[in-house]
Image: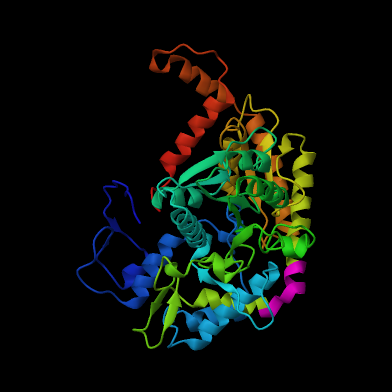
Amino acid sequence: MVLATNSDSEEHLHSTFASRYVRAVVPRFKMPDNCMPKDAAYQVISDELMLDGNPRLNLASFVTTWMEPECDKLIQESVNKNYVDMDEYPVTTELQNRCVNMIANLFHAPVGEDEAAIGCGTVGSSEAIMLAGLAFKRKWQQRRRAQGLPTDNPNIVTGANVQVCWEKFARYFEVELKEVKLSEGYYVMDPAKAVEMVDENTICVAAILGSTLTGEFEDVKTLNDLLAEKNAETGWDTSIHVDAASGGFIAPFLYPDLEWDFRLPWVKSINVSGHKYGLVYAGVGWIIWRTKEDLPEDLVFHINYLGADQPTFTLNFSKGSSQIIAQYYQFIRLGFEGYKNIMENCMDNARRLREGIEMTGKFDIVSKDIGVPLVAFSLKDSSKHTVFEIAESLRKFGWIIPAYTMPADAQHVAVLRVVIREDFSRGLADRLITHIIQVLKEIDGLPSRVAHLAAAAAVSGGEVKTAKMSLEDITKYWKRLVEHKRNIVC
């Protein structure tokens, strides 16, 4: 969805090679009056896409950027299938059901040998979280009505480090979001504080297995035990949803003894992103419920106008089949052993990168040893330069590394984060370390931008400020600068 477009006076596109086929310029913001040769259309678009970043060097993203050629071929062969046409594509439906059961088994769902697991494929974890939240809200409403109590003020408890899709769920579906604030050095939800915030209107507590900010796993086991005590005292039935978007395909292979999933009785649903460490291109997520009773039947629709009775619980209707087929390919191609080897290799490369960053002596490592394979780090001294400058300077080498501030109450801490995916090799880790060292040397020889910004701020708005701005002031400036440069799209 485009929210705004650049007010560029150049309203047409020019393509050097396409001019062999098309002499007229191509309009940018309205459909051309006439058709053009397919070669020219391809070249016009290809020319523009050359200016995109390199996906392999996009270390901001958790999303898979490489798959085997055989899987690419399967995706291309199935790209014209609409998954919702279950009666027309029964094998694709069967593959989705197999994936659901494989994931449920991986997460220790209490499913018998002859039973089918409860879950579905989604368009990423965002849709999965919306569906899980709706199920919790409906179950809460049903309990309240049965008790003759009002249902007009539901809330959900999370940490302030949750991904924006939780804020979207709360706003779109009219649920109050109660956030446990962070503190410096502790960047995940404190389970004790979370349980303190639970009340009779809490539909669930959302725990994150793999925080977007630092990759850290939240303590779901402690949260489960504390909730069990509170439910026993109050007679409530407050449950847990685990947002395992990033960590759901890591923990079973690297930390099999870690209790975070359906082994804990108060965990009722789990989402995971197939397009992250599930190793599939963007466009697929999964939501699994503990039992059939945890998904209210009145949320499931039954349609028959596509040829047979089909139960469906989605926010989207039509969606491609290719990513579901790709997920099944990865499951049977890699198996448990293959996923374990890949995750171990990612973690080894993360350790190598962390060691190289620590050797510079310039950074504090914020991420933890146990969690998603990533390295989050902050400058020890931000009095002259900031992490935002480092991120900007690394772009000239092609690296896309995010710089950002922590949520409340740790917003004064600014960090860089490098996500280690399957296609990030030891060689790339060494190269990135070399470039970070080069950037540090370059900016150390430059005038302090912090001092320059402080001088500018000292006379702005008629206010008199000290010569030294706080890190929070500098961070706000850089965030505004980044936002100004970014296209406003969603």
Between 410 and 50, the one nearer to me in the picture: 410
Of residues 330 and 464, the one nearer the viewer is 330
Q: Does 284 appear above or below 441?
A: below
Q: Residue at x 55, y 27 (%)?
A: 472
Eyeballing the image, is 63 above or below 40? above
Q: Which of 340/24 is in front?
A: 340
Residue 154: x and y, percent?
46, 47
Q: Quadrant of the N terminus?
A: bottom left
**Residue 95 in view:** yes
What residue is shown at x 70% (from left), y 61% (from top)? 250
Is 237 in the magenta? no
Left or right: where does residue 266 sit relative to residue 51? right
In the image: residue 353, left or right of residue 242: right
Q: Give the x, y percent position of residue 349.
A: 75, 56
Where residue 405 sits in the image (x, y, percent)?
A: 57, 37
Residue 414, compared with residue 144, is above or below; it is: above
Residue numbers of the magenta segment: 332-341
Q: Residue at x 28, y 51 (%)?
A: 10
Which residue sits at x=66%, y=54%?
Answer: 209
| Location of residue 353 in the rendering, given as x and y in whole percent from the top left corner | 74, 49
Magenta stretch: includes residue 334? yes
